[in-house]
Image (cartoon, rainbow, N blue to C red):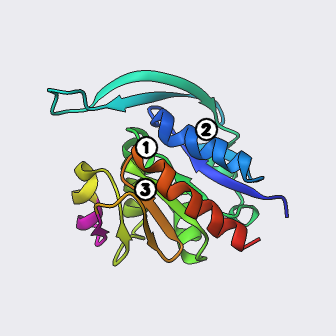
Amino acid sequence: MDKKALIVIGDASETIDTLYPFFRLQEAGITPVVIAPEKRTYQMVMHEVRPGWTITREWEGYQLKADLAFCEVTPEDYLGIFFSGGRAPEYIREDQDLIKLTQWFFDHDKPIASVCHGVEIPARADRVRGRRMATVAKCQFDLEICGGIYVNEPCVIDGNLISGRTYHDSGHFVAPWIDLMLQNV
């Protein structure tokens, strides 16, 4: 089997959340396959809470082309799935094809990683009940209202589910996700 993993994005996915695992997958010999609502180019963003601000500021980041639409994915062809952060998860989490994909990876105990707002997708897919996860603090409510357990750490491993709070944690949680996928090859 060709070693491939999915990266879930949409417009306003966070640039570092997305590109760090994209390039780390390549370094590990795993082909990153970017999926989104449609097969097209997406505008990513950069997020930061600046000193003196209480909300997140946003700037345009790089663009990234989706290799496949959610409806075109055959989940059995992939080692794992990554849910990127940014504002995209809030808008794409209602996509029924994405919900089915998410449920498939959880139900088949495949390696799953999530960062920041990425938690909104497995939460919407009803797959976080009783699961320990890290996420950005402002998504703690989203996780807990759906039955998940919020953990404020840079890397939380709960079985096949690996998560981090923000892109600042990428150096802590991406490698364990990749290692888990490579153990299953």
Q: Is residue 126 left or right of residue 31?
A: left
For this orientation, the residue located farthest to the right is: 1
Disc 1: CA contacts within 10 A as few (<14), some (14-19) or many (>=20) = many
What residue span does the magenta drawing correspond to? 143-151
Q: Which residue lies under the disc numbered 1?
A: 167
- Amino acid beneath label 1: Tyr
Q: Is residue 7 left or right of residue 125?
A: right
Q: Nearer the viewer, mark 3 or mark 2?
A: 3
Q: CA distance from mark 2 to mark 1?
A: 25 Å
Secondary structure of the residue carrying tag 2 is loop
Disc 2: CA contacts within 10 A as few (<14), some (14-19) or many (>=20) = some
Residue 109 at x, y percent in the picture: 58, 76
Disc 3: CA contacts within 10 A as few (<14), some (14-19) or many (>=20) = many
For this orientation, the residue located farthest to the top is: 60
The answer to if 144 sits in the magenta stretch is yes
Q: Which residue lies under the disc numbered 3?
A: 121
The mark that comes first in sequence, 2 or 1, is 2
Residue 174 at x, y percent in the picture: 54, 55
Nearer to the camera, 12 or 151? 151
Q: CA distance from mark 3 to mark 2?
A: 17 Å
Q: CA distance from mark 3 to mark 1?
A: 17 Å
Q: Which residue lies under the disc numbered 2?
A: 38
Nearer to the camera, 51 or 134? 51
